[in-house]
Amino acid sequence: MKNILTLCFTLLLLVGCGNEPKKEKFTYKRTKTEIKPVVNSTRLVLNSNDLMMFDKNLLKGQAGKEINLILNHTGKIAKEFMGHNFVLLKKDVDVDDFAQRAVIAKDNQYIPEGDETIAYTNMLGGGESDSITFTVDEPGSYIYICTFPGHYQIMKGEFIIE
Ligand code: CU
């Protein structure tokens, strides 16, 4: 009896196997890693170096259009000695006054308290980068500086919003 049962069971298994739906072929969806085009956004790259210089003193953007700015510090000197940032000032800000107050704002990455900036990056040392995104609504000429002590008179540029 036991043998018959075993036989039945084996048969069942075999039949079962036979009926088993064929495994579907392995399919996969190709998911493209899309590099999204920068739609409705202006991308700007500004470099700074160990010689205390920005590589551009004129930048342009459009009013109301998102601006993505990447600041690179292409040098090697640490930020305690050759720190650089990008600080875009509002229109009526007194640059000298702002920069002088920035010197004593070390604890806040040399950004003085107040409401005088449109956008700014982190203070960078050699080899570092930062990226910021901002929008300026009003066309005109704006000033950007590096607020590290002693830098702004050289590290200064005009940002034109068209
Ligand atoms: Cu600097």
Image (cartoon, grey):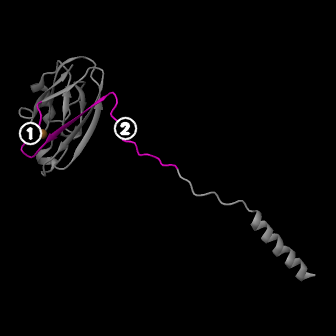
Question: x%, y% of residue 8?
Answer: 87, 74
User: Which residue appears at 52% of the width and 49% of the height?
Assistant: 29
- Give the image quarter of residue 143: top left
- Crowdedness near tag 2: few (<14), some (14–19) or many (≥20) residues, C-alpha within 10 Å: few
Question: x%, y% of residue 87?
Answer: 19, 32
Q: Secondary structure at mark 1?
A: loop
- Crowdedness near tag 1: few (<14), some (14–19) or many (≥20) residues, C-alpha within 10 Å: some
Q: Secondary structure at mark 2?
A: loop
Please tell me how many numbered marks the rendered image carries. 2
Q: Which mark is residue 62?
A: none
Q: Earlier in the sequence, mark 1 or mark 2?
A: 2
Question: x%, y% of residue 41?
Answer: 31, 29
The answer to whether mark 1 and mark 2 are in CB contact below 8 A is: no
Amino acid type, callout 2: Lys
Marks 1, 2: nearer the viewer: 2
Between 7 and 158, the one lying in front of the other is: 7
Residue 158 lies in magenta, yes or no? no
Q: Which residue is mark 1?
A: 53
User: Which residue appears at 6% of the width and 32% of the height?
Assistant: 153
Residue 38 lies in magenta, yes or no? yes
Amino acid type, callout 1: Met
Q: Which residue is mark 2?
A: 36
For residue 42, above or below residue 141? below
Q: Which residues are magenta?
A: 29-57
